[in-house]
Amino acid sequence: MSVLVVGSVALDSVRTQSAAHDNLLGGSASYASMAASFFGPVRMVGIVGDDFPRAYMDLFASRGVDTAGLQRAKGKTFAWSGEYEANMNNRRTLSVALNVFETFRPDLPAAWRETEYVLLANIAPALQHHVLDQMRRPKFVVADTMDLWIETTRDDLVRLLGRVDMLILNDGEAKQLTGIDSLPRAAAALRSMGPRWLAIKKGEHGCLLFGEGEFFTVGAYPLEEVKDPTGCGDCFAGGLIGHLAASGTVDAATLRRAVVHGSVIASFNAESFSLKRLEGLSKDDVAARFDAFRRFSRFE
Amino acid sequence: MSVLVVGSVALDSVRTQSAAHDNLLGGSASYASMAASFFGPVRMVGIVGDDFPRAYMDLFASRGVDTAGLQRAKGKTFAWSGEYEANMNNRRTLSVALNVFETFRPDLPAAWRETEYVLLANIAPALQHHVLDQMRRPKFVVADTMDLWIETTRDDLVRLLGRVDMLILNDGEAKQLTGIDSLPRAAAALRSMGPRWLAIKKGEHGCLLFGEGEFFTVGAYPLEEVKDPTGCGDCFAGGLIGHLAASGTVDAATLRRAVVHGSVIASFNAESFSLKRLEGLSKDDVAARFDAFRRFSRFE
C-alpha cells in the first residue's frame, strides 16, 4: 500500500560541537519519505528550487520514493541552518530562508488523491488542511506538528485535529498545546480534540502511544553517541506510517509495532548527519534493530 | 529470604502547591523497607529519637518489617522538610536537622550478619561501608545513592562501588558521577568501577537496567496525578531487592522483573503523601499493576 507524505524539502546546514556540514538534504518530507520507504512505496509532495541537487533526486528514486508530487520552482530551495549544544538536546536555529517554500501549495497529482495512508509531516497546518481537502476517503491520516504552529497558527492546528486519525508531537508540545503538565491528562485532552490516536515523542526517553483503552510505552534505542538528531521526529512519523501501510491494518497491536518501527528508523537517523545513515541502511538492519527493541523491552 | 535494609528514618514535612503535611514518616529505610515488605520479611537498620511515634513502629510491625535493628536514641528523630514546585519534578529542601542521625553507627544484630540480600539505601557511603564490614558473604548487595554524596564524599562512594553487586542512581547522578552525558557510556563507566549491575532511574520516563550483555528499559506507570514523589526512589530500590530476595535468584530475567516491581511500588507511592498509599496496599494490587506494566510494554 502506498503512503502519501507531504512536508518540507530543505537544504540544511547543521553545526554540532564536533562537526559542521552545509547543503545537506533536509526537511520533514525528505526524512519522513526516506523512513517510510523501508516498508513500501512512497509518494512525496513538496517543493524545491532550481538549485536542488540532482543527487538528492537520485537518492529518492533509489529508495522507491516517487517524486511526481515534488514541485520544482524558480528560485532557491527552502534553507535552514541550526546548531546543537554539546548535549545534543538543545538546538538553536541560526537562520531560515523559506525561498520557494513561501508560495508552496501542495496540489496533489490526481491519481494520488486516493492514497489510503497519509502522513501530513511537519508543515503549516493550513497546508496540511489543503492536502486533506483534496483526499478521497483516506484510511488513516497522521499529522505531525511542532511548537511553531502551536504558537503562530493554533486555530488552524486545532481545527486540523478534528480531521486526522493520529497526532504526533513531543512531550513539551503536548503540554504547550493543552496547558496541562500531566502527560496522561494532556493526552486525554488532545484525543478529545479529535484524533483517536496520539503518539508523544520523548527523544532519548522513548515514546508513548495513547488510544481508546490503550496505552503503550517503549524506550529509545541506547545510542552511545548521537551524531545529529535533526529529522529524528520526521523519521519516527515516516517509519510509523510506512509500517501501518505495509500492514494494511490499524488496530492497537499494529500501531504498537508501528511506533517501534518509527523509533527504529529514528534511532538509525541519529547516527549520522542528514540522511546519510538511512542511505546505506537495509531492511535487514531495520529488522535486526526491531528485534533489539523487542529484546530490551521484554520481561516475563 | 529476608532482606536487610539500612538507611535513614525521618520525620518529614512536605509541601506541594495544593497541600502541606508535617511529621510524616519518611527516610530511605522507611520507604525501602515498606516497599520490600510486599515480597517477604524485612530487617530494618536505622535510628530514631525518643519522639518517634509509636504508630509508625506499629506500621512497620504490621507489614512484617523487623525493627530489631532500629536503634532508639535520646533526642529527636532526623527531620527533613521540603517543597515541590507545581510540576512535581523540582524539589527544594527547606530544612534538615540530623538530630540523632548525627551519631548513627549502623551496627547489626549478630543474627542479621548472614542476611543474603542487602539494600544499602540512601545514606552516607561511610555508613554503607560500615554495614558491609559486618556482613558475611551476602549473596547480592544493592546500593542506592544521591547527588549529595557524589558532591561531598565522592571517594567513599567510588570505593563502595567495588563492594556492591548493583548500583542505583538517577540519570542526572549518573552523568554527575562520571562526567559523561551519554547514558549508555556513563553506564559502562560506572560498571567498570565495580557493580556488575546498574539501574538508572528516570522518574516519569521510567528506568534503565545495564549488565554484561544486558540492557533493559521500562516506562513509568502513566499516573494522572503525582501527589507526592518523596521516597519513590527508595521504594524502587526496596521493591527491587524485595523481589530478588523472594525469587532467590539474580539472573537477568529476574532482575528485569525486579526492576518492574520496583517501578510498580514507586508508582503507588507517588499517589499519596508519605507511606499512606503503601499502608493500604495489597499483594493483589501489586500483582495487578505488574500486569498493567506488562500490558503497556508489550509488542509482538
Image: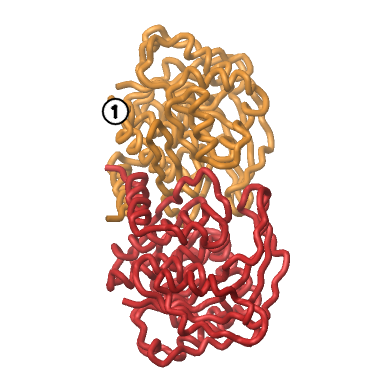
Chain colours: A orange, B red
Q: Where is residue B65? Give x, y as percent.
A: 43, 74
Q: Is residue A233 left or right of residue A43?
A: right
Image mark count = 1
Within-10-Å neighbours for mark 1: few <14, some 14–19, many 20+:
some
x and y percent of residue B82 in the render? Answer: 68, 62
How far across and down, in percent of the image, does residue B251 sit? 29, 69
- Asked where in the image residue A180 lies, by quadrant, the reply is top right
**Taking A298 as reference, is B232 left or right?**
right
Front in this rendered view, residue A294 or B263: B263
Residue under label 1, please give it: A246
At numbered mark 1, what does the secondary structure look like: helix, strand or loop? helix
Query: Residue A144, relative to residue A102: is it above or below?
Result: below
- The quarter of the image holding the C terminus of chain B is top left
Q: Is residue B175 visible?
A: yes
- Residue A211 picture location, percent across and down: 41, 32
Height in image: A268 above or below B37?
Answer: above
Q: Nearer the viewer, residue A53 or A269?
A: A269
The residue depicted at 40 percent of the width and 66 percent of the height is B240
Q: Amino acid at mark 1?
A: Ala
Foreground residue among A21 and A80: A80
Q: Is residue B219 above or below residue B151?
A: above
Q: Can residue B194 be seen by looking at this rendering?
A: no
Residue B69 vs A239, above or below: the answer is below
For the residue pair B157 and B273, the one nearer the viewer reads as B273
Instruction: Chain letter for mark 1, please.
Output: A
Name the residue at the right extreme: B94
Using residue A123 as the reference point, say whether residue A165 is left or right of it.
left
